[in-house]
Image (cartoon, rainbow, N blue to C red):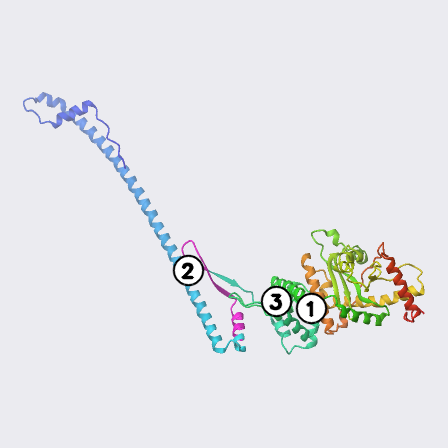
């Protein structure tokens, strides 16, 4: 610290001070002078003493202030040292605890691996050990570490909610009654096992360090039970002991696998030999030759979409039910056994049956001439074309025309009954689903494939599930689009009546 200089003395003070310091000359000193100068000398000494004391006090105050500042800095430095010491001790304790948890996890994994190796990887005890390991720990620690700012490490943990799988374990047991299994999944256990075997190569997942993979049977069961019951995802979660988002993901994954893997096997337009067999069976039932399929279009209710909501508004269902309805369409062609040979899914519910037909791939194949010499029988909602046979719709029908309408109705009943079983077996098609609009074609396509599998394997439908299927039929404005088809229809009607194939109802 810099200290200011002392104040200067006056000239008279310095002269007197100088004279006091010199040795006195005895010859020059007189008695009279001494007596006269003593009072002035004493006054000067007192003033000098007072000024020296005031300067000393100022100096002491400055030195005291400097010492206080030094003391404050030392106190702050001591506090910082204590803080750093505490922080280092906390970080050290955290590192010790983390390393201890890692050692315990590694020891447990080594123990389990040794136990599995001792019991054998292919034995039932090994799978029991894995299941016990997954059920015992709700917290799974990963080996991934992230470095903190202080130089330590922190572990990531996966928290798994414990959910009950009691219902699924009971249903999956071999002792579970066959009737109850069929009621839950709309198919027998043998058909369910066949579907699992077909999908295993696509649906199977591998175990990870985080969790054990969901088995194939449980994955397929989640999807089929959801489609069969139409229950909300929260109910699916409770039944199978899985998360809601996991159940939703499984439904979409399995439906996509069914559509991509099983549709080419179980839902295809018949080849030449198959078409000849279908024609023979339909002619045996109705007497109408060259019938290659029965066509029908139904509507599946949906929640109002956010985009193009007017296109999906179903005016006919809204007027009939007195409730605003939105839907998408499902057009299908079936064979005499009710098995789908062609489907067209996803067009908006505001479209009529003839408009959906014009948008379908079936219409494109017919335009290219693939359906030559084949009749596809439809109801009055379709137009009469070279390959589409529909009933007469005008009034005052003749006996011949009425006879043909009855036979066409018999063929149409096959398609309508098939669609009724489709919706009854997969109840999700009767309810407004919360699925996204872009996911519905995949789900509905999977329902049609599963329907075919059940029909081919003669899976009967419970009588309690049957209902009356009703879809409005709007006659197109241009209901006759081919004069050749009109002439061919008249010939078929004449043949049925005059060859005793019209039935007793006409007579």
Residue placed farthest to the left in the image? 27
Q: Earlier in the sequence, mark 1 or mark 2?
A: 2
Q: CA distance from mark 1 to mark 2?
A: 60 Å
* Residue 468 visible in the current orientation: no
**Residue depicted at 90% across the width and 58% down the height:** 394
Q: Which residue is mark 1?
A: 265
SS for dot 1: helix
Determine which residue is flagged by label 3. 202
Numbered badge on residue 93: none
Residues at marks 2 and 3 touching, judged by CB atoms closer than 8 Å = no
Q: Measure the C-alpha gap from mark 3 to mark 1.
A: 15 Å
Q: Looking at the image, can residue 269 be seen?
A: yes
Q: Is residue 486 left or right of residue 181?
A: right
Q: Nearer the viewer, mark 1 or mark 2?
A: 1
Numbered range of the magenta stretch: 128-154
User: What secondary structure is marked by label 2?
Assistant: helix
User: If you read the primary sequence from the N terminus, does the residue marked by circle 3 or circle 1 appear first?
Assistant: 3
Which quarter shows the C terminus? Answer: bottom right
For image coordinates 64% across by 70% down, the residue present is 198
Frontmost of labels 2 and 3 is 3
Quadrant assignment for the N terminus = top left
């Amino acid at each position: 610290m810099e200290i200011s200089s002392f104040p200067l003395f006056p000239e008279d003070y310095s002269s007197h001070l100088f004279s006091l310091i010199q040795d006195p000359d005895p010859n020059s000193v007189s008695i009279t002078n001494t007596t006269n100068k003593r009072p002035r000398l004493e006054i000067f000494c007192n003033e000098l003493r007072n000024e020296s004391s005031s300067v000393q006090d100022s100096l002491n105050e400055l030195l005291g202030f400097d010492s206080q500042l030094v003391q404050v800095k030392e106190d702050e430095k001591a506090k910082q040292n204590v803080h750093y010491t505490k922080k280092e001790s906390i970080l050290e304790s955290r590192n010790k605890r983390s390393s201890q948890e890692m050692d315990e996890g590694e020891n447990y994994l080594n123990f389990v691996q040794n136990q599995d190796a001792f019991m054998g990887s292919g034995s039932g005890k090994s799978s029991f050990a894995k299941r016990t390991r997954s059920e015992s720990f709700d917290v799974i620690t990963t080996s991934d570490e992230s470095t903190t700012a202080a130089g330590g490490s922190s572990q990531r943990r996966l928290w798994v909610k414990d959910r009950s799988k009691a219902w699924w374990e009971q249903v999956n047991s071999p002792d579970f009654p066959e009737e109850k299994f069929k009621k839950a999944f709309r198919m027998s256990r043998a058909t369910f096992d066949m579907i699992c075997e077909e999908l295993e190569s696509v649906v199977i997942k591998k175990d990870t360090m985080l969790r054990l993979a969901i088995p194939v049977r449980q994955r397929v069961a989640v999807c089929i039970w959801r489609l069969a019951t139409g229950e909300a995802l929260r109910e699916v979660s409770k039944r199978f002991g899985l998360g809601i988002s996991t159940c939703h993901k499984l439904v979409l994954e399995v439906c996509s696998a069914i559509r991509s893997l099983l549709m080419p096997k179980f839902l295809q337009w018949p080849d030449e030999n198959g078409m000849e067999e279908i024609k023979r069976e339909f002619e045996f039932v109705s007497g109408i030759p060259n019938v290659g399929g029965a066509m029908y279009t139904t509507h599946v209710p949906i929640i109002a979409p956010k985009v193009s909501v007017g296109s999906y508004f179903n005016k006919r269902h809204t007027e009939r039910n007195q409730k605003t309805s939105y839907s998408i369409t499902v057009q299908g062609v079936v064979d005499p056994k009710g098995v789908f040979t062609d489907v067209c899914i996803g067009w908006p519910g505001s479209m009529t049956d003839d408009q959906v037909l014009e948008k379908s791939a079936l219409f494109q194949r017919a335009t290219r001439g693939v359906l030559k010499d084949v009749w596809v029988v439809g109801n009055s909602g379709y137009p009469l074309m070279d390959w589409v046979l529909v009933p007469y719709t005008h009034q005052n029908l003749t006996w011949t025309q009425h006879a043909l309408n009855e036979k066409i109705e018999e063929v149409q009943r096959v398609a309508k009954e098939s669609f009724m079983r489709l919706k009854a077996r997969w109840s999700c098609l009767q309810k407004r689903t919360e699925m996204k609009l872009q996911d519905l074609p995949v789900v509905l396509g999977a329902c049609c494939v599963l329907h075919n599998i059940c029909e081919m394997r003669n899976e009967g439908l419970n009588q309690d599930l049957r209902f009356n299927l009703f879809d409005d039929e709007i006659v197109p404005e241009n209901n006759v689009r081919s004069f050749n088809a009109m002439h061919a229809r008249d010939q078929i009607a004449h043949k049925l009546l005059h060859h005793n194939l019209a039935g007793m109802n006409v007579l």
